Image (cartoon, grey):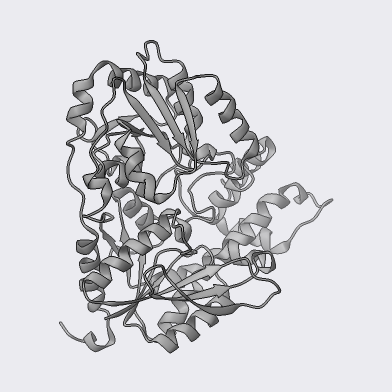
């Protein structure tokens, strides 16, 4: 079969989880004998036009690179996850390539217009849920006040979320959330301005209007996706509660490369316990919590913490992390790490830290840790607890509970036998089995199978 993979940037070095998994899935499909093409984007263009430039992936596979100017995008594109121009260009590419089906691994810039484009050509569509963009305007289920969303997507809850970073906004959201949705929508469409009595509700009503437009746009598009593959039961629950049907959603854990160096590189012995963090330096990744817990260990007994990463647009946060790291000589800030060095890094680590404060989907670095037989000490959140089993391949602690995190760290330092036991915590599915499942399920949606029992 000929299969089109729609993804993120897909430019070497592949660092982001979406592109790493796209490459992994593409190679798995090719090893099964399928032809693969890629659609990826490049937001560094100039002017207002969208163009397509032929390119090649590192393995020589064709990449249709969609070039555009990020700053020229209408704001509505990001709010509604719909860009008709992106859909038009995608339709041209798909009409030229005529794949049997399409797998969308990320809607961030391509938007749900690509679903519309594929279905107009009668091409079945699968979506690998690498994030929450189709069911959350933020894409993270994090609120504006950095608290996690526990409610889900709707006009009122999301309008409240986008003004929740200010006390008045939180108050306004609480009040407006009690009104009937029809009333809120009616007021939002009126566009009240100061000094009207409802003028103070303008920020809330502006976002309510955006959310109505978003939901009106994407609800029918979501239903056109033939198959949604979710890597954890938490992601499955989230998609089912926010607009997708049980007939669409299929639980399928992410697969790994069976012959990866991560699986074969032996651990380098050490006379002390070595913690490792690797991820984005953003508040919701929780590195500040890990540093606080590590710096307050009652008996570190020589334990070290190596941190991989770089500033990621949160300069003040990064400055605070630097201060916390420099205060302890047993913390080593190692900067960015190329993908080719991952196996070495995990060979020199005993425990991988994943202190996230948001609902992770299925972070690939977590799979890397487990494939390298590195136990995980992570937050007890949906996207982590669905992969890490407490006391089997890692330890879980209540999210944002620094005292519990510190206690778990100390326990691992004090009990080396526990670390050894957690290293043997189970196997992961292969990318070939993952790819085979997708192909088998998508075959039922091919036009040639219409009406076949």
- In this rendering, the answer to whether 395 lies above or below 156 is above
The answer to which quarter of the image holds residue 448 is bottom left
Question: Seen in the image, is 410 located left or right of residue 133?
Answer: left
The one of 351 and 330 positioned closer to us in this rendering:
330
- In this rendering, the answer to whether 361 lies above or below 229 is above
The answer to which quarter of the image holds residue 88 is bottom right
Quarter in which the C terminus is drawn = bottom left
The single residue placed furthest to the left in the displayed view is 453
Q: Which residue is painted at 27% across and 72% down in the image?
A: 30
Number of marks in the rendered image: 0
- In this rendering, the answer to whether 31 lies above or below 353 is below
- Residue 232's x, y, as percent? 30, 50
Question: Seen in the image, is 243 located left or right of residue 143?
Answer: left
Question: Seen in the image, is 325 located left or right of residue 232?
Answer: right
- In this rendering, the answer to whether 89 lies above or below 9 is below
Query: Is residue 361 something that shows in the picture?
Result: no
- Residue 39's x, y, as percent? 45, 73
- Residue 246's x, y, as percent? 29, 63
- Residue 113's x, y, as percent? 50, 74
Quarter in which the N terminus is drawn = bottom left
Query: Is residue 373 something that shows in the picture?
Result: yes
The single residue placed furthest to the top in the displayed view is 298
Q: Which residue is painted at 51% across and 74% down in the image?
A: 65
The one of 333 and 116 positioned closer to us in this rendering:
333
Q: Which residue is painted at 57% across and 46% down in the image?
A: 161
Q: Which residue is painted at 27% across and 44% down in the image?
A: 387
The one of 118 and 430 positioned closer to us in this rendering:
430
């Amino acid at each position: 079969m000929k299969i089109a993979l729609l993804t993120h940037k897909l430019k070497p070095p592949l660092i982001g989880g979406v592109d790493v998994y796209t490459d992994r899935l593409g190679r798995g499909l090719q090893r099964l004998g399928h032809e693969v093409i890629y659609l990826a984007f490049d937001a560094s263009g100039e002017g207002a036009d969208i163009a397509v430039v032929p390119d090649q992936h590192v393995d020589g596979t064709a990449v249709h690179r969609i070039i555009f100017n990020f700053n020229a995008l209408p704001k509505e594109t990001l709010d509604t996850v719909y860009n008709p121009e992106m859909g038009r260009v995608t339709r041209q590419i798909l009409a030229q390539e005529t794949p049997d089906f399409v797998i969308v691994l990320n809607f961030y810039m391509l938007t749900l217009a690509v679903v519309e484009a594929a279905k107009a050509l009668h091409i079945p569509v699968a979506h690998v849920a690498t994030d929450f963009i189709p069911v959350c305007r933020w894409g993270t289920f994090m609120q504006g006040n950095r608290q996690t969303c526990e409610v889900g997507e709707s006009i009122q809850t999301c309008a409240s979320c986008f003004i929740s970073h200010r006390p008045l906004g939180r108050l306004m959201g609480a009040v407006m959330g009690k009104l009937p949705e029809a009333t809120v929508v009616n007021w939002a469409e009126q566009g009240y301005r100061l000094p009207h009595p409802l003028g103070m509700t303008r920020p809330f009503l502006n976002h309510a209007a955006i959310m109505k437009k978003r939901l009106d746009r994407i609800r029918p598009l979501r239903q056109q996706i033939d198959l949604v593959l979710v890597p954890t039961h938490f992601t499955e629950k989230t998609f089912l509660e926010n607009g997708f049907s049980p007939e669409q959603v299929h639980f399928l854990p992410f697969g790994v490369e069976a012959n990866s160096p991560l699986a074969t590189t032996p651990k380098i012995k050490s006379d002390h316990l070595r913690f490792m963090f690797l991820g984005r330096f953003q508040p919701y990744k929780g590195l500040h919590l890990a540093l606080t817990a590590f710096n307050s260990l009652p008996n570190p007994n020589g334990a070290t913490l190596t941190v991989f990463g770089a500033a990621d647009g949160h300069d003040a946060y990064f400055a605070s992390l630097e201060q916390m790291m420099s205060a302890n000589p047993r913390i080593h800030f190692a900067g960015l790490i190329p993908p080719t060095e991952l196996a070495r890094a995990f060979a020199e680590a005993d425990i991988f830290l994943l202190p996230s404060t948001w609902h992770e989907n299925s972070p690939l670095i977590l799979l890397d840790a487990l494939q390298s037989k590195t136990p995980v000490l992570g937050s007890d959140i949906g996207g982590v607890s669905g992969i890490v089993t407490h006391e089997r391949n890692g330890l879980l602690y209540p999210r944002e509970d620094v005292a519990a995190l510190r206690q778990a760290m100390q326990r691992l330092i004090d009990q080396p036998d526990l670390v050894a036991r957690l290293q043997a915590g189970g196997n992961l599915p292969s990318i070939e089995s993952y790819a085979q499942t997708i192909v088998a399920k998508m075959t039922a949606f091919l036009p040639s199978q219409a009406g076949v029992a």
